[in-house]
Amino acid sequence: MEIPWTEKYRPALLSQLKREKAVETMISWAKKWKEGIPSKKGLIIYGAPGTGKTSSAIALAKEMDWEYVEFNASDIRSKDAIEQNATKGSFYSSISDERNRKKLIVMDEVDSLYERNVEGSDAGGKAAIANLLEKTLNPVILIANDLYALRSSSSGKTIVDRCEQVEFRRYMKSQIVSVLKEILQNEGIYAPADKLNEIAENANGDMRAAVNDLQGIGEIYEAEGRDITLTAYAVINDILHGHNRDIRGTKAEIMNVGMDPNDFILYLLENIYPLHSRVEDYETALRSIGIADLFLGRVGRRMNYSLWSYANDLMAYISELNLKSDRFEKFAFPSLIRNMSSLKKYRGIRKNFSMVMGRYVHKSSAFMNKDSLIYFYYLLQRDEEFREMIGRRTDLDVDEVLSLEL
């Protein structure tokens, strides 16, 4: 099974993160541990998902020659669980290592801890982390998406006060494109510049999402410059307009496109809809696509990739039908993929808007997104002075926010 590119190309060195100021803060904090135990034993790394927070902690441990031990705070959210898993381990260096290395304790998603159970009493998760920061003999890194959510309780404020903080802002579009180009070069794959720009735009500063999209995108150019989109066009044109009897040859063409059948069927479905002049053949074609889709669904559920062959048979069979249109039909990109990309961009803009506005009222981005975002949207829409102030003081793209049409 192929390694996900997010893991394959995870930055191994801090210098690869493209975050000079943040890296300086991290190294400065880490060097204090060489001189003894610093006053602030913890470091909080906060910022949006996909900005390299966890990768930076891994890289720091490697460069400082520390043992890396990670916990997810959302999985060990109770006081007892945190003390059992993290606090006890923080008292000791690596027993198995002759050099007695320091142990870097990393706790992810610390802002997801909520202090009250159904009866309203203190569950103690954040208090346990505060206790960890007071007693630890080893460096501790806390990772959070929303620093203001972490500060929302008295114990959360105690945690923040005992740590140095470093913010990881969203990556700029140019930084994402640069990384995508490096990955494609290593993979021996070519993709057009406009496709990389589109991926970077849709990622909304999330490098991990961009790399995932790059690996999974169906219409990138393969090695040696073969354009999958254009190849798909040729094959689909043969299926819909060729009216040939060589089903085996058509099936071979589908397989040679190099596109995931789940993506290919979307291209086929998008371009078959205008061809409804012959109702009987049109219905037969749609029925074949529907059955092919069932086979593809079973591939995912059963992990039986031999079923792909049956789906390809059904798609190839459509080439025997006499489909036609009263006018020329332009080859169309699947609207489902386009709409999913638009929805992802919409959610990214809204999430960033929630985070920025949450800072002003000291609420979490989740609270803002659910309960109060619409009021700030109306303020931006109707109050020019407020709109200009937000534009000056934050990195929020106000025009982009107003395009949400809440």
Image (cartoon, grey):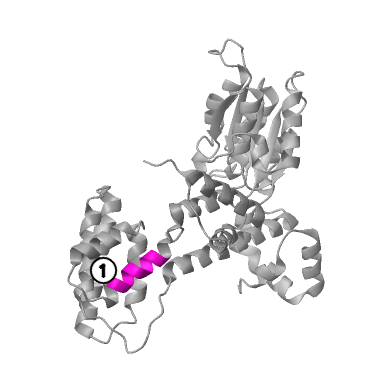
Q: Which residues are magenta?
A: 230-238
192 or 265: which is nearer to us? Answer: 192
The quadrant the N terminus occupies is top left
Residue 243: image x %, image y %?
22, 76
Q: Residue furthest top?
A: 98
Dominant SS of magenta comes to helix
Q: Amino acid at mark 1?
A: Ile
The residue lying furthest to the bottom in this view is: 326
| Residue 87 appears in the rendering | yes
Task: Say if 246 sits above or below 12 in the image.
Answer: below
Residue at 22 percent across and 63 percent down: it is 249
The residue sitting at 18% across, 68% down in the picture is 246
According to the picture, the residue beneath numbered tag 1 turns out to be 289
Q: Position of residue 318 (x, y in %)?
A: 23, 72
In this image, 6 relative to 171: left or right?
left
Residue 307 left/right relative to 7? left
Residue 168 magenta: no
Looking at the picture, tell me which residue is in the foreground, 29 or 23: 23
Q: Give the quarter of the image for residue 198.
A: bottom right
Q: Residue at x 20, y 69 (%)?
A: 317
Q: Position of residue 388 (x, y in %)?
A: 80, 69
In the image as oriented, which residue stretches furthest toward the front? 224
